[in-house]
Amino acid sequence: MFQLGKTIISEDILEKEFVCNLSACKGACCVDGDAGAPLSEAETKIMEEIYPKVKPFLRKEGIAAIEAQGTWVKGTDGDLETPLIDNKDCAYVIFDGKTALCGIEQAYNQGIVDWKKPVSCHLYPIRVKDFTEFAAVNYDKWDICDDACSLGKELEVPVYKFVKEALIRRFGEDWYMELEKVAEELKNS
């Protein structure tokens, strides 16, 4: 672990390798698990605002779940998250054949909304936990991502480089440049 500004960072994000392999996992992270995608309070407001524009991209099951539960929910642990369909799929998930995709991201890709998706999804496999004085930035190892780990190793892409855009979105360009310096120093030591 090391500190960068108001973040405490696991060295795993510098040392582990990862590149999503959607053709292998079929987007399992959007349909497996026991909770929706983590959201910030600010993101809950965005979810409410964009829902009418995203709704045409969603499956009828997702629309029903959102209209019954809301555009976001409080999970069993009290954290804010996306609602689920029958405690399984994220309500915002859509399918291209057997591959799960994000309905919000599809609306973004088509220029309908200007918000890509929840930052927690964009950051995955990094998970950020905010505390009063700092944020913990950790690598989340999940067996459904074994193919992504293998592809990352094959392509020699560390986690922090794979999620560069999302890290900049969450922490800013200057923070990311400092992270790169730490990674370079670690690599050369």
Image: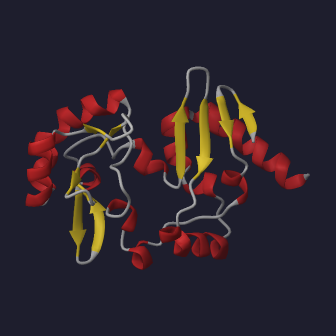
Q: Residue furthest front?
A: 76
Q: Position of residue 78 (x, y in %)?
A: 36, 34
Q: How many marks?
A: 0
- Side of 4 relative to 26 (left or right): right
Q: Residue furthest top?
A: 133
Q: Position of residue 130 (x, y in %)?
A: 53, 30
- Residue 15 vertical position relative to residue 122 in the rendered view, above or below: below
Q: Position of residue 166 (x, y in %)?
A: 49, 45
Asked which quadrant contains residue 23, the reply is: bottom left
Residue ID at (25%, 50%): 104
- Residue 149 vertical position relative to residue 132 in the rendered view, above or below: below
- Residue 13 vertical position relative to residue 8 in the rendered view, above or below: below
Q: How is the image coloured?
A: secondary structure
Q: Is residue 150 visible?
A: yes
Asked which quadrant contains residue 146, the reply is: bottom right
Residue ID at (39%, 62%): 29
Q: Quadrant of the N terminus?
A: top right
Q: Between 164 and 35, which is closer to the camera in this rendering?
A: 35
Q: Position of residue 2 (x, y in %)?
A: 76, 38
Residue ID at (52%, 69%): 143
Residue ID at (31%, 63%): 31
Asked which quadrant contains residue 167, the reply is: top right
- Residue 88 vertical position relative to residue 152 in the rendered view, above or below: above
Q: Is residue 91 visible?
A: no
- Side of 87 relative to 76 (left or right): left
